[in-house]
Image (cartoon, rainbow, N blue to C red):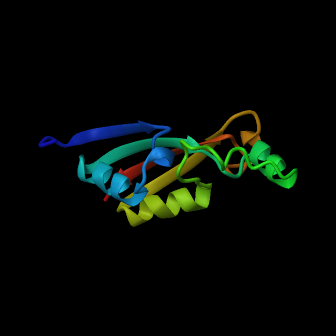
């Protein structure tokens, strides 16, 4: 786009793209200075994923649709590497009260540098 945006919302997309670094850089390039990125993705550290792995069931990782998997730490690093600042991460779901490593989904709000 020739125009820049004040905000971009990417709902459950990043885990499906081959090159998430290029995807995030493209989003950054489409934002105005100080623009906001709102992004969600499944949390690889969610309790159901941990339990299934302990039981030897890796069905979540065998998905032909999910190419990448993110934890709060790896998502934050990816956003920082793409030039985002003021990154706020939260998790959602019934176990999110345990902290960002335990919710089923990750919600990120980041500001373009």
Residue 89: x and y in percent read: 56, 49
The front one of 112 and 11 is: 11
Above or below residue 64? Residue 33 is below
Q: In this view, does 66 lie to the left or right of 18?
A: right
Residue 1: x and y in percent read: 16, 41
**At 81% across and 47% down in the image, what residue appears?**
52
Q: Which residue lies furthest to the left in this view?
A: 2
Q: Residue furthest right?
A: 55
**At 56% across and 61% down in the image, what residue appears?**
74
Above or below residue 2? Residue 77 is below
Above or below residue 15? Residue 74 is below
Can you say which quadrant of the picture contains the C terminus?
A: bottom left
**At 72% across and 46% down in the image, what residue appears?**
46
Residue 51: x and y in percent read: 83, 48
Quadrant of the rendered structure where residue 63 is? top right
The front one of 68 and 25 is: 68
Q: In this view, does 10 lie to the left or right of 46?
A: left
Residue 30: x and y in percent read: 24, 47
């Amino acid at each position: 786009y020739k125009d820049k945006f004040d905000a971009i919302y990417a709902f459950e997309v990043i885990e499906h793209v081959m090159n998430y670094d290029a995807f995030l850089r493209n989003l950054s390039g489409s934002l105005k200075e100080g623009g906001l990125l709102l992004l969600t993705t499944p949390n690889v550290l969610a309790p159901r994923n941990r339990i299934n792995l302990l039981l030897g069931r890796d069905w979540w990782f065998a998905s032909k649709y999910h190419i990448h998997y993110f934890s709060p730490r790896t998502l934050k690093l990816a956003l920082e590497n793409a030039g985002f600042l003021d990154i706020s991460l939260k998790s959602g779901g019934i176990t999110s009260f345990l902290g960002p490593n335990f919710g089923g989904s990750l919600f990120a709000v980041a500001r373009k540098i």
